[in-house]
């Protein structure tokens, strides 16, 4: 088969490890698989073999001589869903912590999309490939309310509302430390970390605008329960902003640093409120998801 080739541009792959760059470009394979391809000489940079750890430079041409497998069809699975509301255009669900939103590397099944295809087969093929009506996402560890499009019209209109920042999003988070400023705005631009492709950070070569408002709801000796309102929807935005502010989310093993070693049942981040205009009627709809019992139980231990 013909080789796949990619060009490295400034602020898009520059300074990134070769195996990390390849895993970003071709998600059908994992980073470890690409390391194997590199070792076998199936990858070249400017016509020369390089190690997986080679740092790419602007202008480099990366060629891959591997066969890309066709994507596997996503099938419906009888995974229980808690439905808050549904009509011909939208579905509101309460996602539990631990449920991955859509299939990807390492998660080919058992996702929210698999559940949606089982309970609402009409969403198949709606929107981006493999997304089946999804117009936004939550991290796997995050729980809370989500909206899914059920019709082409709803998909287009909800995507527009998210893009134009017309959606009301409110989260609840338990963070480390007392926040001396009771409310404020965190507006550091964020993007992929300069060396770790699995993390997002304010330390990035490609920063994107990110704005998060917060307000302290209750203070504890070592923690603060905060209400968070993200105006933008960058990946891991709330977690990165709060960690950068010195108040990582409790239970965050990716951004919590040394504090992440303290045992929590899960990430204490919950999508509490979601509001939007109905894509057909224009009526404002707002849905609330209470804190799951396991998070309520954590708060009870803090009151002791």
Image: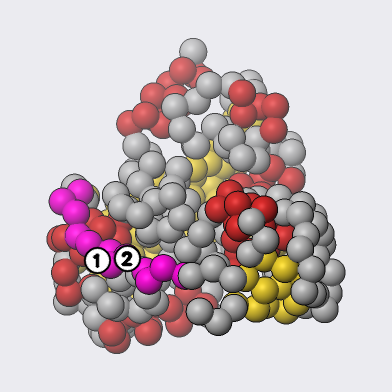
Q: Main secondary structure of the magenta part?
A: loop
* Residue positioned 39% across, 77% down in the render: 128
Q: Quarter-wise, where is residue 280 in the image?
A: bottom left
Tell me the mark number nearer the camera, choosing from 1 and 2. 2
* Image location (x, y in percent) of residue 238: 60, 51
* Image location (x, y in percent) of residue 53: 76, 52
* Residue positioned 50% across, 37% down in the render: 267
* Image location (x, y in percent) of residue 165: 53, 74
Q: CA distance from mark 1 to mark 2?
A: 25 Å
Image side of residue 163 versus residue 81, left or right: right
> Considering only vertical position in the picture, is 11 above or below 216?
below
* Image location (x, y in percent) of residue 215: 60, 47
* Residue positioned 80% across, 57% down in the render: 54
Front-most of residues 61 and 243: 61
Front-most of residues 283 and 171: 171
**Magenta part of the chain:** 68-79
Query: Dot 1: few (<14), some (14–19), or many (≥20) neighbours within 10 Å?
Result: some
User: Circle 2 — which element?
Assistant: loop
Does the magenta run of residues contain 77?
yes
Q: Quarter-wise, where is residue 283 in the image?
A: bottom left
Q: Is residue 43 visible?
A: yes
- The residue that disc 2 covers is 72
Number of numbered callouts drawn: 2
- The residue that disc 1 covers is 91
Image side of residue 8 versus residue 121, left or right: right
Name the image colouring.
secondary structure
Does the magenta run of residues contain 188?
no
User: Circle 1 — which element?
Assistant: strand
> Considering only vertical position in the picture, is 182 above or below 192?
above
First in residue order: circle 1 vs circle 2: 2
* Residue positioned 32% across, 65% down in the render: 72
Query: Dot 2: few (<14), some (14–19), or many (≥20) neighbours within 10 Å?
Result: few
């Amino acid at each position: 088969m013909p080789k796949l080739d990619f060009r490295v541009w400034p602020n898009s792959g520059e300074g990134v490890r070769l195996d990390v760059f390849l895993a970003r470009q071709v998600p059908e394979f994992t980073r470890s698989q690409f390391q194997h391809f590199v070792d076998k000489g199936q990858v070249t940079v400017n016509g020369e073999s390089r190690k997986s750890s080679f740092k790419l430079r602007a202008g480099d041409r990366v060629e891959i001589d591997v066969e890309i497998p066709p994507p596997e069809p996503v099938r419906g699975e009888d995974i229980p869903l808690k439905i808050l509301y549904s009509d011909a255009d939208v579905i509101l669900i309460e996602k539990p912590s631990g449920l991955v939103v859509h299939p990807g590397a390492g998660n080919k099944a058992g996702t929210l999309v698999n559940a949606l295809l089982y309970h609402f087969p009409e969403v198949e093929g709606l929107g981006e490939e493999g997304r089946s009506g999804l117009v936004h996402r939550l991290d796997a560890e995050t729980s809370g309310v989500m909206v899914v499009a059920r019709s082409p019209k709803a998909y287009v209109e909800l995507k527009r509302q998210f893009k134009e920042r017309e959606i009301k999003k409110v989260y609840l988070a338990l963070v480390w430390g007392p926040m001396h400023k009771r409310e404020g705005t965190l507006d550091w631009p964020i993007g992929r970390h300069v060396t770790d492709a699995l993390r997002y950070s304010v330390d990035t070569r490609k920063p994107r605008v990110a704005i998060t408002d917060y307000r302290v709801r209750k203070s504890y000796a070592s923690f603060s329960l905060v209400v968070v309102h993200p105006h933008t929807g960058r990946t891991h935005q709330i977690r990165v902003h709060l960690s950068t502010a010195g108040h990582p989310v409790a239970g965050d093993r990716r951004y919590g640093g040394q504090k992440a070693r303290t045992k929590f049942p899960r990430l204490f981040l919950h999508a509490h409120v979601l509001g939007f205009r109905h894509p057909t009627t224009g009526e404002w709809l707002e849905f609330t998801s209470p804190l799951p019992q396991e998070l309520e139980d954590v708060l009870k231990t803090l009151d002791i």
